[in-house]
Image (cartoon, rainbow, N blue to C red):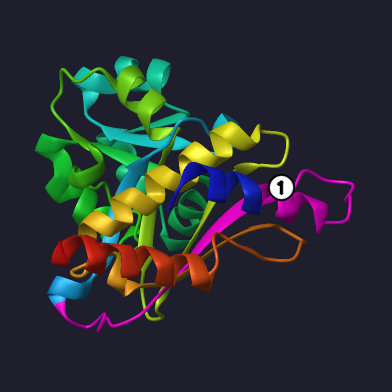
Amino acid sequence: MEKQQVLDALKSARENSPKRNFKQSVDFIVNLKGLDLKKTEHKVDFYAHLSSLPASKIKVCALVGTEMIENAKSGCDRAILVDEFGQYDKKAMKKLASEYTYFVAQANIMPKVAQTFGRVLGPRGKMPNPKAGCVVPPNANLKALVDRLRTTIRIVAKNDLFIMSSVGSEEMSDEILADNVLTIYNSLLHVLPNEKDNVKSSIVKLTMGKPSTIGTQSEVKAERKGKKKRGGE
């Protein structure tokens, strides 16, 4: 996938999206093939750090002990002390899960976090995840972590052979949106067993707009033909 192909697709997506009275998101969709998502080696679940995202969309809640509470209050959108865990019933935990994108936890209280919040956060894929850097020691710099999380997204193919993610909103420049698309795409290739051969098609679209395919089937075939030719030389 070339950047110019992404820029061309974004231009087409904008042209084919009627003006709305709200800011539309720009979505990137990759249709996959040749995978059995039930197999561990075929699972698609990773984090991508993007160039820029609207910060207001990503909120972070910290679950910490007393030694980290002030750090958490200044660096995160919300901080919950371990001694307050008992105040949260299932309804309150569901509300938390809907309000916050990421949950950060102090490493030495993770058993209590899992015991209290696991039944609600776990099924929603929001338990503090070490892969995203969300399980931290008591001396961690939470502000730096949160700044990074605000431009980090999780990409998952759960039951169907596609991934879909917002790469920004329509007021962002096509250059930044294209960089975000390429970051996700290249990160995706690293987790696919057969890389590009597991990609059926790639699409960008605005929330209420028509999908725009990145590249064309003829370009894909030409690329593969070129690779075969180079391999035989």
Residue 24, magenta (yes or no): yes
- Which residue is pictured at 60% across the width and 44% down the height? 7
Amino acid tagged 1: Lys
Provide the secondary structure element on which disc 1 rests.
helix
Q: Which of 63 and 146 is in front in this view?
A: 146
Q: Find residue 197 and report its horizontal and vertical position in percent.
A: 29, 72
Residue 40 seen anywhere in this rendered image of the structure: yes
Specify few, some or many for label 1: CA neighbours under 10 Å numbering under 14, 14-19, or 20 or more.
some
- Which residue is pictured at 73% across the width and 54% down the height? 12
Mark 1 — residue? 11
- Which residue is pictured at 39% across the width and 43% down the height? 183
Which stretch appears magenta? 10-39
Residue 117 seen anywhere in this rendered image of the structure: no
Is the C terminus in the top left, top right, bottom left or bottom right quadrant? bottom left
Vertical comparison of 226 with 161: above or below: above
Vertical comparison of 140 with 38: above or below: above
The residue at the far front in this view is: 233
- Which residue is pictured at 21% across the width and 54% down the height? 114
Q: Find residue 75 and report its horizontal and vertical position in percent.
A: 39, 19
Residue 157, quarter of picture: bottom left
Vertical comparison of 99 with 106: above or below: below
Q: Is residue 5 left or right of residue 90?
A: right
Q: Find residue 64 and report its horizontal and vertical position in percent.
A: 25, 31
Q: Is residue 118 left or right of residue 75?
A: left
Q: In this view, does 69 lie to the left or right of 168?
A: left
Q: Which of 109 and 36 is in front in this view?
A: 36
Q: Nearer the viewer, residue 75 or 95?
A: 75
| Number of numbered discs overlaid on the protein picture | 1
